[in-house]
Image (tube, rainbow, N blue to C red):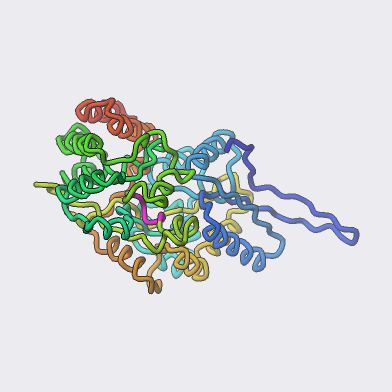
Amino acid sequence: MVGATALFCSVSVVSTAAFAQTTKTITEWDQQTNATSTKVLRDAADRFEHQNPGFKVEDSHVLNEAYKTKLKVAFGAGEPPCVFESWGGGPLHEYVKAGQVVDLTPYLQKNPAYRDRFLTTSWDAVTYDKKQYGVAAENASAAVIFYNKELFKKYDLTPPATWDQLMHVVKVLNSHGVAPFALSNKNKWTGSMYYMYLVDRIGGPEVFRKAVDRSPGGSFDDPAFVEAGKYIQDLVKAGGFAQGFNGLDYDVGASRRLMYSDKAAMELMGGWEASTIANEDPAFASKLDFFPFPSVPGGKGDPRDVIGTVGDGFMSISTECKDPAAAFKLIQSMTDDTSMQGRVLDKKIPPVKNITITDPFLKRLQALITEAPNVQLWYDQELPPKLGELHKDTSQELFGLSLTPEAAAQQMEVAAKAGS
């Protein structure tokens, strides 16, 4: 996957005894909170300041859920930051439709070599009406199942390729008092990853695409959506998750702590988790490996498909920014070769072409993304905001066994018809 008063682009005057010098301040917000990730961004800001005398960058790094709220409040108050990170898709589109985001197309047209550095499909999530409103900064990422290699070896387990094999792993781990999956589902998007993968594995990518586009025959109560809910509830009933999962908070590392303490053996999460774990617990990072989400019996989806994004951490400029040209230069610094190599060292896969990656772990993850027949953007980011929130709510209720798969699918379809 913080209500402080928003700062925004402003101009302040710095006086000295000898002279008065005007300093222009550019505010930048993101949700990168790892020490190594924030260093990449701060170093980029320092380079920008050095190359553009008279400018100062004030950066703010906020945890995921709090960041979403802070950004929404700031835009609602008409006081957004100058440069801000987003996930693209539906939520960014709402700000674009409200006239609150700068069209970056003219800047990109003036810098074709810069634009061409990025993976072509990385522009999809920030392109509306053939105009670009963001630049992919952080990483190309896919959700994978991370697992503890030592626990798997201890209990003679191998990474499962099919759902039946996964359920065998669940049974064996439970028999030894180890929770199969760590899940912090208070945040809701964490659990929705299972639902997204199951819909894809059962019905293929077109099921979701047709439902979103309201194409003939497309519906959120398609059997694939219902079956996905049934698979989730079967996994819950089989003891697939550590207890209390719907109340655990991902942003404070609850699921990872279960992994670190050997209380849980697996976690389905975006590829960025490798970076987070390397920062938090380098010793445990040596035990970490991953495998793709398994296939399901009779599924129409290609098991090589992934849920994720070809480019993440999209950087955009708000229309409240007093100097968008300078802000774009800051974005260029945040996405230059030095920044991208820094992200590789941070165990991320930058969304640019011809990047050198030697880490075997990252190379496997990169191949998973580049060789996938389809990369499905996270539902809560692709869907319109209200429908995305409903998706997260119904997914969490499915995990809590408080909503039937049929009812969850029906709620989504009713809301989609109503234009949510």
Quarter of the image with the C terminus is top left
Residue 246, picture quadrant? top left
One can see residue 205 in this view: no
Residue at 57% x, 38% y is 2
Question: In the current view of this chain or complex, which residue is farthest to the left?
Answer: 298
The residue positioned 27% from the left and 62% from the top of the image is 368
Instruction: Give above or below for 219 relative to 53.
Output: above
Q: Is residue 175 left or right of residue 104?
A: left
Q: Is residue 146 left or right of residue 22?
A: left
Query: Exactly how many numbered labels are in the figure?
Result: 0
Q: What residue lies at 52% left-to-right and 42% top-to-bottom?
A: 67
Q: Per the image, is 126 magenta?
A: no
Q: Residue furthest front?
A: 176
Does the image show residue 361?
yes
Q: Is 184 situated left or right of 212 in this image?
A: right
Q: From what the image shows, is residue 319 above or below residue 15?
A: above
Measured as percent of width and height from the top left, residue 103 is found at 48, 51
Q: Nearer the viewer, residue 38 or 340?
A: 38
Q: Which x, y percent locates residue 180?
A: 28, 46
Residue toward you, 395 or 282:
282
Q: Name above or below for residue 393 compared with residue 241.
A: above
Q: Position of residue 344 (x, y in %)?
A: 44, 67
In the rendered image, residue 247, in percent from the top left (x then y), is placed at 41, 33
Q: Image height check: is 395 above or below 9?
A: above
Q: Residue at x 59, y 34 (%)?
A: 77
Residue range in magenta is 269-273
Who is closer to the viewer here, 78 or 353? 353
